[in-house]
Amino acid sequence: MVLYEEFDFNQVISDLENACLTEEQCGSCVKKDCIIGYAQQCITKCFKDGITYVENGSDNIPISDLKLYNTEELERGIAHILRQCKSCTSNHFDNCIINIIRNCYEVGLMGEIQPYEGSNFRYLNHVYSTHPEVADNIIEEFHNSNK
């Protein structure tokens, strides 16, 4: 799990804002029913409480959210959140804020949560096997965001 002091809250908040198409597009904003709104609520709670996990966070992701989002920004958000991930393998924690944010992006981008086994490499291999174009875009942004 990532340490609070190492987590780039500003990057995540910015990425979430960029992925949202705003109320103009959706008509209204019900944060608990929206993957971006839910992720924003989780990140705010973590920031305020000085923690990097959300109790039962992965169980409450609004997986039935069918709204449209900025696809490029969702891909960029996954790349950025993977850069913060510690690839903790056997210590992977579903309620880690990184996992929750990535899962929210996945629902908006691919329609469902993707398996994650604590390894960015294995995760990207899986995404490539099911959504090769999405994986290519994530990988490209992952490498470019390191510069």
Image: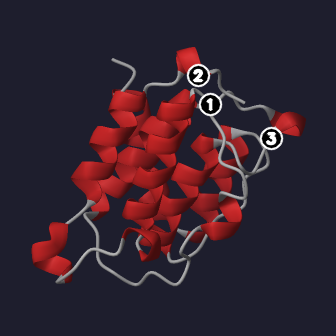
Residue under the image location 33 percent in, 80 percent down:
67
Considering the image in quadrants, where does the N terminus appear?
top right
In percent of width and height, residue 126 lies at 67, 58
Is disc 3 placed on a helix, strand or loop? Answer: loop
At x 38%, y 53%, the residue is 75
Q: Which numbered tag is attached to residue 92?
A: 3
Q: Which of pointers 3 and 2 lies earlier in the amino acid sequence?
A: 2
> Label 3, label 2: how many angstroms apart (C-alpha)?
16 Å
* Amino acid type shown at disc 1: Ile
2 and 1 marks in contact (CB < 8 Å): yes
Secondary structure type for disc 2 = helix
- Asked whether disc 3 touches disc 1, contact meaning CB atoms under 8 Å apart, the reply is no
**Residue under label 2:** 4
Q: Amino acid at mark 3?
A: His
Residue at (78, 31) in percent of width and height: 88
Circle 1 residue: 51
- Say few, some or many: other residues with alpha carbon within 10 Å of mark 2 (under 14 / 14 to 19 / 20 or more): some
* Residue 72 as seen in the image, left or right of residue 6: left
